[in-house]
Image (cartoon, rainbow, N blue to C red):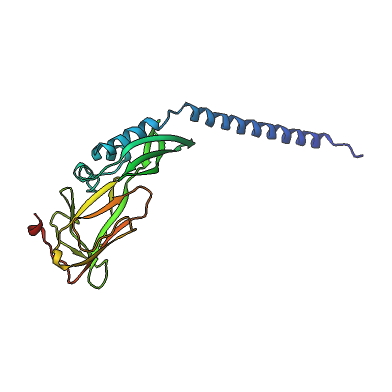
Amino acid sequence: MTSLTGRQRTAIGVVVVLAVLLAAAVIVAISLIASLSSERPSPVPLAERYVTALANGDATEAARLDGHDPADEPFLSDDALGSAERITEASVEGYQYVGDAATATVRFTLDGEQHTAEIGFAWQDDAWVIDEGLASAFSVTGGVQSPSDYALPFEIGGVVAPDESGEPVFGLERSYLAYPGVYDVDLLIDPATIVGITIDPALASDTTGEPVRFTALPGAAETRIIVRLTEPPVSDTEGTS
């Protein structure tokens, strides 16, 4: 059997020492991460403030908590949310987190049915912040040849879109955000030109009735309110005021 030279024994010794040091560093890093995570407070109080604001129609507080700017999202406003049928019996069922991310499961009742949803959080500046709230997207379009020819003017709770003029805009595709609720949408066009209305996904549908009602649910696909017309739309803000 060939014996190891002094240089070989030294090299093996260095490798063993390095392996031990590396394993120790990994253990220390894992322990440090676990220690930091265990010291972080629960995000549940923040989630509770958020769903309470939504249930009370306080969109200003909800937007402050989830980082949305009502100037960019006009229907994340007190007027719009205050006009909706809002969530009730809201509660936070639990949470989990890994590192700098956390999720909380919330349960609420809307339009007589129970729903669950998740709120996402990020650890920033030694505190949890909401980085994925409960707002969902919707759009209102219509046309003669194509259902998306025009972004139609509409109103929710006194808030008018696409802009304050109440005029239809050809070729504009615009989605808006809404907090959980059941909303009545007043179409600001001549109702005599409406052939039919479809809401996709089919949470509700109508033929020619106004106002149009739709349900905004977190986690759902974008709600598309599609209006079929007999002729290009003309603003009817004077007739609907």
- The residue at 46%/37% (across/down) is 100
Q: Residue furthest left?
A: 238
Q: Position of residue 51 (x, y in %)?
A: 32, 37
Q: Pinpoint residue 210: horizontal percent, then vertical percent.
A: 18, 58
Q: Residue furthest bottom?
A: 145
In the image, 204 versus 50, the foreground residue is 204
Indicate the position of residue 2 as horizontal and vertical percent values.
90, 39
Q: In the shown orientation, is residue 52 left or right of residue 236?
A: right
Viewport quadrant of the N terminus: top right
Q: Quadrant of the C terminus?
A: bottom left
Q: How many marks?
A: 0
The quadrant where residue 62 appears: top left
Q: In front: 7, or 215? A: 215
Q: Is residue 189 left or right of residue 198?
A: left
Along the viewing direction, whichever of 156 and 63 lies nearer the viewer = 156
Does residue 230 sit above or below 185 in this rendering? below
Q: Is residue 142 above or below residue 213?
A: below
The residue furthest front is 112
